[in-house]
Image (spheres, rainbow, N blue to C red):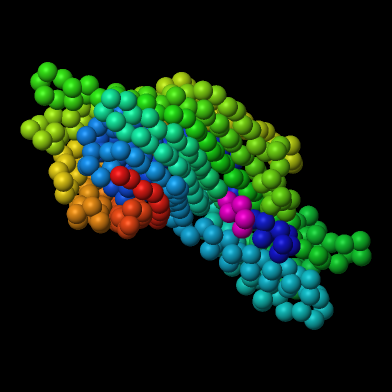
């Protein structure tokens, strides 16, 4: 296996075939404000964020400085989880393979020492063993919205995209055996005899060594969802002094999958642009939401939302390469979340919980979040946000990276009518960030 082939491996990062036949959708898009508050928003979303979090909140009672118009353009966020520093491992393995290939090309049974060859073979075997089943995951999101809130009839137009990519290492036992045999030979003649008979040593027409052909595989599993639609909401004043808001978001949805598995020696980074490894599907869907506010100053608010009420599914493509992949199904199922909040002119404190579980996609954990978030406002000009969320569905039997407890924080600034929101996320496995620009009045 030549060095440029390992560069292709580092692009893929991972290696192996997924064992599950069902792949769930990426996590729903969230605004930078929600990102910084532990992913909350069902009971506290501002008008421009409401289409992504709870459409009913467009018609809720908001501060006077953001209850007439809201614009988000754009909002982006990303998370990366790499528990075992998989990318660094692959880079180091790449270097060791180059050294071993160079040693084998220069090997002369009559004059060469075998110590360097054995050292590099043993080092490579150890590194491959450490890489086996290690996983890396990335999540991205981007969105925009324009909202015209009103307690009589609110309307917003929105678009967003989310994606999840997981990649994993699967080291072949034959590769490890090959390297162990090299590392344990007793003489140059024994090494010459072994590499002369091994089918893992690549040679040209003259019989000269040109590389080694390892059989470890690389797999990338990815899904993405694009959606665009309109949100409508209305407020209803109740006889008991409370206010009920109802909202609906009809939308157009497009789903994508990408699945590619190949042995390292044949791994081709150009495959990422190849339609044969992608599938896509479009359809109509709908989100609905409700919110209820009460108290002397309407300081309490409860919300509930159900997203993607029409189930959709999309089968992944099967490889046409040298490896026959298992076909997977990307499922978009209804997700229900409920929350409660207490608010004033200077603070928001909220708690929410997913009432449904999202099955794992690729090499990751099932998720069902319980979250707490808070925002502290300094006279409209600055907002400090913090949050924490815990995954109730996390388990040790997942096929990849666990998602347990995540901590978030963020800052909002309003400067000459322009809103800038920043968010950050940290856990034992994940790091993430969010940025959003917009305006409201």
List x then y, in percent, for residue 241.
Answer: 11, 24
In the rendered image, the quadrant that contains the C terminus is top left
Q: Residue at x 28, y 42 (%)?
A: 66
Q: Is residue 9 visible?
A: yes
Tell me where residue 19 sits by quadrant: top right
Judge whether 254 appears above or below 435 on screen: above
Q: How many marks?
A: 0
Residue 300 rendering spot, x and y as whole percentages: 15, 34
Q: Decide: is 378 above or below 35.
A: below
Which region of the structure is painted magenta? 10-14
Q: Indicate the quadrant where residue 234 lies.
A: top left
44 w.r.t. 86: above or below: above
Judging depth in this view, the residue of 331 and 228 nearest the camera is 228
Residue 286 coordinates in the image, percent (x, y): 43, 24
Residue 11 in magenta?
yes
Q: Identify the main secondary structure in magenta.
A: helix
Q: Nearer the viewer, residue 284 or 66?
A: 66
**Residue, far top:** 239
Give the image quarter of residue 65.
top left
The answer to whether residue 178 shows anywhere in this view is no
């Amino acid at each position: 296996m030549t060095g440029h082939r390992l560069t292709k491996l580092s692009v893929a990062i991972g290696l192996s075939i997924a064992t599950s036949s069902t792949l769930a959708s990426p996590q729903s898009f969230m605004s930078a404000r929600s990102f910084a508050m532990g992913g909350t928003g069902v009971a506290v979303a501002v008008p421009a964020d409401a289409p992504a979090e709870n459409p009913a909140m467009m018609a809720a009672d908001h501060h006077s400085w953001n209850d007439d118009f809201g614009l988000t353009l754009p909002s982006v966020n990303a998370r990366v989880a790499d528990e075992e520093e998989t990318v660094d491992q692959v880079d180091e393995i790449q270097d060791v393979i180059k050294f071993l290939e160079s040693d084998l090309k220069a090997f002369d049974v009559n004059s060469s020492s075998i110590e360097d060859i054995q050292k590099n073979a043993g080092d490579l075997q150890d590194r491959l063993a450490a890489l086996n089943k290690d996983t890396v995951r990335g999540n991205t999101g981007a969105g925009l919205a324009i909202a015209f809130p009103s307690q009589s009839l609110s309307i917003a137009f929105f678009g967003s995209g989310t994606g999840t990519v997981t990649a994993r290492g699967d080291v072949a036992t034959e590769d490890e055996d090959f390297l162990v045999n090299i590392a344990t030979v007793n003489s140059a003649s024994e090494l010459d005899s072994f590499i002369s008979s091994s089918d893992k040593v690549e040679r040209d027409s003259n019989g000269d060594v040109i590389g080694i052909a390892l059989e470890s595989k690389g797999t990338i599993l990815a899904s993405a969802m694009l959606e665009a639609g309109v949100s409508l909401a209305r407020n209803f004043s109740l006889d008991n002094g409370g206010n009920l808001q109802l909202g609906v978001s009809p939308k157009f949805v497009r789903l994508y999958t990408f699945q590619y598995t190949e042995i390292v020696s044949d791994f081709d980074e150009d495959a990422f642009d190849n339609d044969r490894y992608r599938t896509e599907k479009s359809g109509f869907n709908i989100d609905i939401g409700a919110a209820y506010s009460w108290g002397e100053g309407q300081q309490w608010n409860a919300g509930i939302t159900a997203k993607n009420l029409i189930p959709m599914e999309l089968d992944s493509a099967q490889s046409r390469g040298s490896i026959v992949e298992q076909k997977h199904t990307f499922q978009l199922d209804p997700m229900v979340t409920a929350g409660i909040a207490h608010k004033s002119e200077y603070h928001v404190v909220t708690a929410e919980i997913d009432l449904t579980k999202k099955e794992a996609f690729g090499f990751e954990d099932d998720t069902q979040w319980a979250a707490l978030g808070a925002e502290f406002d300094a006279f409209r000009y600055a907002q400090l946000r913090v949050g924490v969320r815990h995954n109730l569905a996390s388990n040790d039997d997942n096929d990849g990276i666990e998602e347990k407890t995540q901590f978030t924080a963020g800052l909002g600034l309003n400067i000459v009518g322009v809103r800038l929101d920043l968010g950050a996320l940290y856990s034992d496995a994940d790091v993430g960030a969010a940025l959003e620009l917009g305006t409201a009045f």
